[in-house]
Image (cartoon, coloured by chain):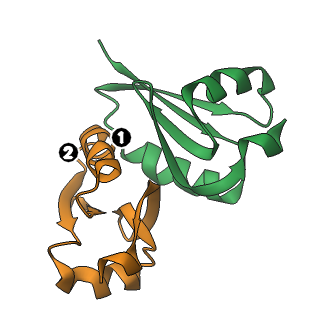
Chain colours: A green, B orange
């Protein structure tokens, strides 16, 4: 079964750059990739916070959070 | 030809966690992966600085730098 990779972003330039490069480099044979725009999908904010996400862009690999560079604080998206 | 993915770290716990997860998720059919320990390979520090790396762990995908979480400042490794 594939592991889950969820990329949380907010449409910022830093986010788009990370999405294209980091997400594009993942092995999609092993990971099921989902992209969540927290600026528009505000209903996913509690889930992101629960995972421990503080800023976007962030990548959750099988539930483990990695903040990639810095685009925007999660609190700025509320 | 494969693109190059270089993972710069300093052996810190944050680095090891990112190495195992993020690096392990990359598609090695498309990326040639190299791991550089800047704590021991200090000769690679100028190269890392030139790429724009400010802290480790950091991942350079085809020359584009992504800082992943925060382990240590590059200046602390000199």
Is residue B21 left or right of A19 when viewed as pictured?
left
Residue A8 % position (x, y) = 61, 36
Q: Are marks 1 and 2 on the same chain?
A: no
Name the secondary structure under disc 2. loop
Q: Secondary structure at mark 1?
A: loop
Quarter of the rendering occupied by the C terminus of chain B: bottom left
Residue at label 1?
A26
Q: CA distance from mark 1 to mark 2?
A: 10 Å
Task: Please report the residue visible at 63 percent of the width from the left and 28 percent of the height from the top.
Answer: A48
On screen, A78 above or below A72? above
Residue at 59 percent of width and 36 percent of height: A53
Q: Which residue is mark 2?
A: B29
Q: Which chain letter goes with mark 1?
A: A
Residue sitting at 60 percent across and 47 percent down? A57
Is residue B69 positioned above or below A6 on the image? Answer: below
Q: The N terminus of chain B appears in which quarter of the rendering?
A: bottom left
């Amino acid at each position: 079964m594939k592991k889950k990779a969820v990329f949380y972003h907010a449409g910022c330039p830093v986010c788009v750059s990370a999405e294209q490069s980091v997400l594009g480099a993942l092995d999609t044979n092993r990971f099921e990739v989902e992209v969540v725009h927290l600026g528009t999908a505000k209903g996913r904010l509690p889930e992101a916070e629960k995972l421990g996400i503080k800023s976007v862009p962030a990548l959750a690999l099988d539930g483990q959070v990695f903040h990639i560079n810095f685009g925007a604080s999660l609190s700025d998206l509320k």
